[in-house]
Amino acid sequence: MDTNILIIVYATFFAAAFIKGLTGIGFVSLCLPILALFMKLEEAIPLVAIASLISNVMIIYQTGRLKQSIRRFWLLYLSAFPGIYAGVFILNMVGNYAAKIILGILSIAYSILILLKIEISIPENKEKLLSIPVGLTNGFLNGLTGTQIIPMLPYLLSLKLDRNGMINAINLGFTLSIIVLLIIFGKFDLISLETLKYSILGAIPVVAGIYLGGKLRHGVSEERFKLAVLIILIIIGVNLILNA
């Protein structure tokens, strides 16, 4: 891989990990749109996967609640697996062009959703009913574009979980999905040993970013920082659509 591209990759890893350490989410949502500007999406997704896995495990360890998340959301997590397979299958068929446009749209939609602070409330008796379609859709978009946020994040936010509970639940879902995604990418020959090597080396900036972000989590105005990141995501999303 070209040295300049590697510098961009690892700088992006550090910045996205720092933001995730600060807010609990956002690693893949920031990494993929940036890297997709410089490489094919089917190359960027497995490159980000290992680094994302490491960031998720660190956040899960910091927040706890692992057993509670598994007990409550196991159906949501399992439902994502067939969706991931379908998404990778479509990506393998349609290629880079359509997937980049969809990723751009999702980046913009995610940013607007958070900026507008749209609040949705799901009654407890509807939670299980919605977990399967939410999981399937989330898995499909994950397999197609690499993004893991929509619609899982709005769904979990609508359940009014406390901060650590929400962060743990969504990162556990991300972790399980990444493992399945890597297996399926291997099945479709969309991942190489070289990609895995560069992704594993990315653990260094990821661990540093998560650690520093976690240290500053309670000392920095999260709202202003998040606002700047979301505006950047919108700009990147528009650029992806225009240049796909």
Image (tube, rainbow, N blue to C red):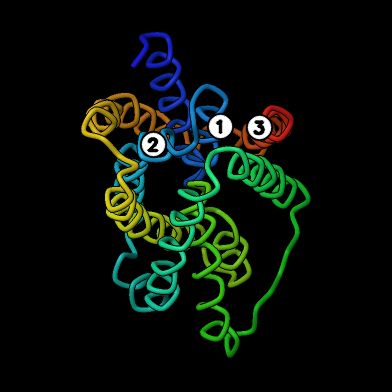
Residue 27 x, y percent position in the rendering: 47, 39
Disc 3 designates what residue?
244
Assess whether mark 3 and mark 2 are in contact (beta carbons under 8 angstroms). Answer: no
Is 61 or 110 nearer to us in this picture? Answer: 110
Residue 226: quadrant of the picture: top right
Is 191 or 31 nearer to us in this picture? Answer: 191
At a point 52% along the width and 48% down the height, the residue shown is 147
Label 2 to label 1: alpha-carbon separation: 27 Å
Residue 15 x, y percent position in the rendering: 47, 26
Quadrant of the drawing holding the N terminus: top left
Q: As shown in the figure, which amino acid type bears the numbered disc 3?
A: Ala
Q: Is residue 142 above or below residue 108?
A: below
Query: Element at badge 1?
Result: loop
Q: As shown in the figure, which amino acid type bears the numbered disc 2?
A: Val
At a point 54% along the width and 62% down the height, the residue shown is 152
Q: Is residue 135 above or below residue 227?
A: below
Query: Element at badge 3?
Result: loop
Label 3 to label 1: alpha-carbon separation: 36 Å
In the orientation shown, which residue stands out farthest toward the front? 93
Question: Mark 2 or 1 closer to N-term?
Answer: 2
Is 15 or 177 nearer to us in this picture? Answer: 177
Q: As shown in the figure, which amino acid type bears the numbered disc 1?
A: Val
Question: Mark 3 or 1 closer to N-term?
Answer: 1
At a point 34% along the width and 65% down the height, the residue shown is 65
Q: Few, some or many C-alpha atoms within 10 Å of disc 1 (few <14, some 14-19, many ≥20)?
A: few
Label 2 to label 3: alpha-carbon separation: 20 Å
Disc 2 designates what residue?
48
Return the mark for residue 12. none
Disc 1 designates what residue?
220
In the orientation shown, which residue stands out farthest toward the top? 4
Residue 211 x, y percent position in the rendering: 34, 32
Q: Few, some or many C-alpha atoms within 10 Å of disc 2 (few <14, some 14-19, many ≥20)?
A: many
